[in-house]
Amino acid sequence: MKKTTTLLWIALVVVILGFGVGIYLQDLKHQESTEAAWKANRFNMERYYKIRQFTGKINAGNWEHMRDSIGSQLDSFMILRYRKEMDSLNKSRSK
């Protein structure tokens, strides 16, 4: 009976330690992804504010040219974002 109880306690300690290590590793990955998201968001917000400032300069004379310029900037922004996501996916797949 005592041997069975000891084995159960050892198993319980191993399971609790496993959960603790898993939670710790998950927290490390969460911190890493949060930091990357903040950096990306800061860059995105800077571009967004530039585009917003650009749109404030639109008038009847330059509207069409400015609209096309804004469209191309947003297109390049989306392409860069897609490339960054694909690089991230490819990097995670190669590990």
Image (tube, rainbow, N blue to C red):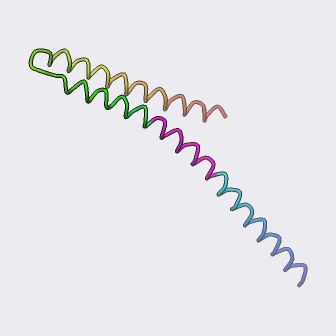
Q: Which residue is depicted at the point 43% across and 31% down?
A: 43
Whole-percent x and y of residue 52? 26, 30
The quarter of the picture where the N terminus appears is bottom right
Task: Decide whether residue 31 is among the magenta residues.
Answer: yes
Give the x, y percent position of residue 72.
30, 19
Q: Nearer the viewer, residue 54 or 33?
A: 54
Predominant SS along the magenta part: helix
- Along the viewing direction, whichever of 49 and 93 lies nearer the viewer: 49
- Residue 57, quarter of picture: top left
Q: Quick check: 89 above or below 70?
A: below
In the picture shown, does residue 19 fall above or below 31? below
- Name the side, left or right, on which 74 lies relative to 86: left
For this rendering, which residue is in front, 73 or 53? Answer: 53
Q: Is residue 37 magenta?
A: yes
Q: Is residue 29 left or right of residue 84?
A: right
Rendered image quadrant of residue 74: top left
Q: Is residue 46 left or right of residue 55?
A: right
The image shows a total of numbered marks equal to 0
Residue interval drawn in magenta: 26-40
Which residue appears at 32% of the width and 21% of the height? Answer: 73
Q: Residue furthest left?
A: 60
Residue 80: x and y in percent read 43, 25
Residue drawn at 26 percent across, 18 percent down: 69
**Residue 9 horizontal/vertical position (percent):** 81, 75
Q: Is residue 32 above or below residue 60?
A: below
Judged left or right of residue 80, residue 64 is left
Q: Residue at x 49, y 32 (%)?
A: 85
Q: Residue furthest toward the bottom?
A: 1
> In this view of the protein, which residue sits in the foreground, 61 or 23?
61
- Locate the C terminus and report the quarter of the image it occupies: top right
